[in-house]
Image (cartoon, rainbow, N blue to C red):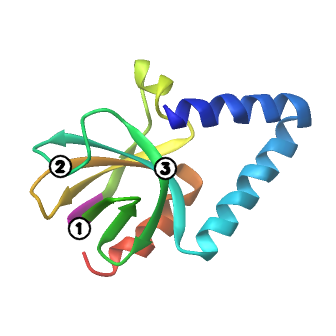
Amino acid sequence: MLGLLGDLLGGLIGGLLGRRGADRIVKRRAELLAQDGQVDCGLRVLQGRHPRVSGMWMHSTARLSPGLITMGRIVVRITELDPTAPRRPKGREIWSVSPQTAIVRVVASTGAVLEWAVPADQLPWALDQVHAAT
């Protein structure tokens, strides 16, 4: 739901400021978050169970550190990460995940397989932040 609201707000800002102005605002926010080791992203469970994460996309700002994605009270301890084949949202999924994201699979210490959606232009940086321990 937050992702949809963010997309709507982004569309409104984009309409008022023009696409370039909105892109600058989004890029600047991403830069400020990255300086603090954070990224706006989404998570959902594909297989298994993980505390506080369902099969529906949930979006928020997450703190990244080696082997960890921390989104509020959700902590994903990464045991496997496959960055080799990121995918883009497809079909009706674009109603809950921005088409500008890249999605990778993550295996958590709980054994659950999750999908992690990160703005495509920030994916290399985000992977570097969590990859050191995986």
Tag nearer the camera, 3 or 2: 3
Tag 3 near tag 1, CB within 8 Å? no
State the residue position of label 3. Answer: 60
SS assignment at label 3: strand
SS majority, magenta: strand
Is 87 within the magenta?
no
Residue 11: x and y in percent read 73, 29
State the residue position of label 2. Answer: 113
Q: In the figure, residue 28 lies in which quadrant?
A: bottom right
- Please, which residue is most extreme toward the right here? 17
Name the side, left or right, on which 47 lies relative to 64.
left
Which amino acid type is shown beneath numbered disc 1?
Arg
Q: Which residues are magenta?
A: 77-82
For marks 1 and 2, give the CA distance: 11 Å
Number of marks? 3
Which amino acid type is shown beneath numbered disc 2?
Val
Tell me what residue is drawn at x 29 percent, y 74 percent: 67
State the residue position of label 1. Answer: 77
SS assignment at label 2: strand
Residue 130: x and y in percent read 37, 72
